[in-house]
Image (spheres, helix red, strand yellow):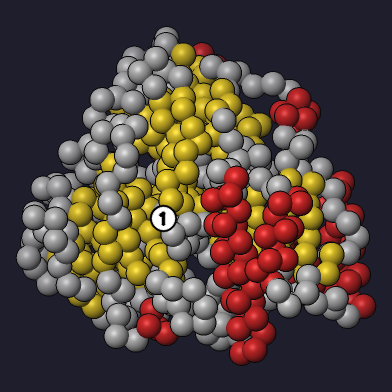
Amino acid sequence: MRAVDRRTEGVRTAEPPPDRAAQAHAGTRVLLVAPHVRAAAVLLGEERGPGAVTALCPDAGGAEDRSAYARAAAEATRRGCPADAAPRPLRPEGLADTLLRELYAVRPDRVVTGDPHAVRDGGAAGAWESELALAVLDAVEEYQRGTGTPVFTDCRVVDHDAWPAVASRPRYPAPLRWAVRGTDGRVTAYLPVPGAVVRWTEGADGRWGGPELLPVPGLLPGLTVVQGPDGYARLLGLRRTSAGADWSTEVVGALQYQTGRPLGPWHVKNNPHRSEPERGKFIGMPAAVCDGAGTLHLFLRNDLHTLNHCYERENGAWSGWTLLRGTRASEDLAALRVPDGGVELYARLRDHAGTVRWHRGGPDGAWAEDRRVPVHPAPGSLAAAPEAGALRYRYAETGEPCEWRWGAQGPAGLNAPGVTGRITGVQGVPVGGWNCTVLAAEDERGTCAIGTYVDGAPESGVWWSPTGRRTLVPPAVVRDRTGRVMIATLSPSGRLEVTRQIPGQALDFAAWETIG
């Protein structure tokens, strides 16, 4: 099998010069609300821009902290993220009203804050970080109700023990598959914000509508989107049960039947720690997949970092939770369907390098743990591939993107230096007479990169092309009603941007379209 000829059939995208693309988002506004100056310096240092940053912090910090923030502000300004040399003070008194006033004053496209779950291990400092983050989520939700404008909110966990430097990670990872083709062939995109899902819908004429806010009071800013054999999109997330210190979380889900029609009612699947609400605060985002018969399987990391499983019965009712006792797992879960139609779960281990596989011998068999999987993913990189029984990830030691297929002795490299986060894609795309897999990922500059290889043969060569298009979430890849590939991103100003494959032998893409 020959590789796709890079000279004639590589990925080509129509893209304005980088400076013009940056100018288009120069008016982007970011509101950063951190519990202390040290965290504010870390979060500001990770802003890649473009866009102006307004930072709020209730703690003035010591001289060393203020100096670190000033350096981060100077570096951010040079990167196109102008910020003041010190954060503005935020008084704890009347916090909710103060945050709402700041939102109306800044009118941000995006908000960055701390960890709503920090209360568990952080003592008084953790309790304050949690209180502040929850107040930010409440204020954003109220602001959206008042303005009708979505505000994409990123809750970050700052790891002061990270090497070689302090860094943060998302508390609620952005969805990987967030654009789906409905039963009528039209594409719909879904992304979460506090207390709502944002939806964009492709019209029958190819024009897009949105953004549309679909309220889900208390929804935390994370979302899992699953599509079954019936073509319907299932949305799953976590919702706070109440405001104040006594809150816990519940798993909620809704079904999108016809494209563009109202979303079905949100149903509650009780937390596996239902009898212990305090423990219920600390569950992870759900991972889900449909098996060959269309049954939806849901997996959840519990507060002890072991796993729970449940499934949806044929009549729409949910089974009870099954506890999968075994090795402690991290936040990184990948649920996938294997070639025989069953489902398996892969989880990155929490306490040492490696991945655990959960499988069972039949539809009603007991779940069994397998620790011999030759997959060693970097944090935040594990993802299911569109092929049955395939995983994509970045190798923990080198950061190299890899693909591992069910039963293989080892992974195949994807030849993508500089890729961060998770890789998504679709297969079966005709390119130059061959059926190919088209990939999309975020690179180290925060821009979308597109790759391709012959289906089933990444070892024959994978070719990548940068687009220069900034994205706040992992790019989404979907086939439209004509079979063409569509790439979707979220711009720094919170707008949906799409490019579509141009008909022809090569993998060429049209100019990007901005929606909303």
Residue under circle 1?
Answer: 216
| Spot occupied by residue 64 in the image (x, y as percentages of width and height) | 89, 77
Question: On the rendered structure, is 94 left or right of 89?
Answer: left
Identify the residue at horizontal 77%, vertical 30% (top origin). 23
The residue type indicated by label 1 comes to Val
Identify the residue at horizontal 52%, vertical 27% (top origin). 498
Q: Answer above or below: position of 448 versus 151.
A: above
Position of the N terminus by quadrant: top left
Check disc 1: other Cα within 10 Å, few if <14, some if 14-19, many if 20+: some
Outermost residue on the top side: it is 504
Identify the residue at horizontal 60%, vertical 77% (top origin). 131
Count all numbered tags in the image, as a single digit: 1
Q: Quadrant of residue 258?
A: top left
Question: On the rendered structure, is 36 left or right of 70?
Answer: left
Q: Does residue 65 appear in the picture of this structure? A: yes
Q: Nearer the viewer, residue 405 or 92?
A: 92
Q: Does residue 376 appear in the picture of this structure? A: no
| Spot occupied by residue 501 in the image (x, y as percentages of width and height) | 46, 19
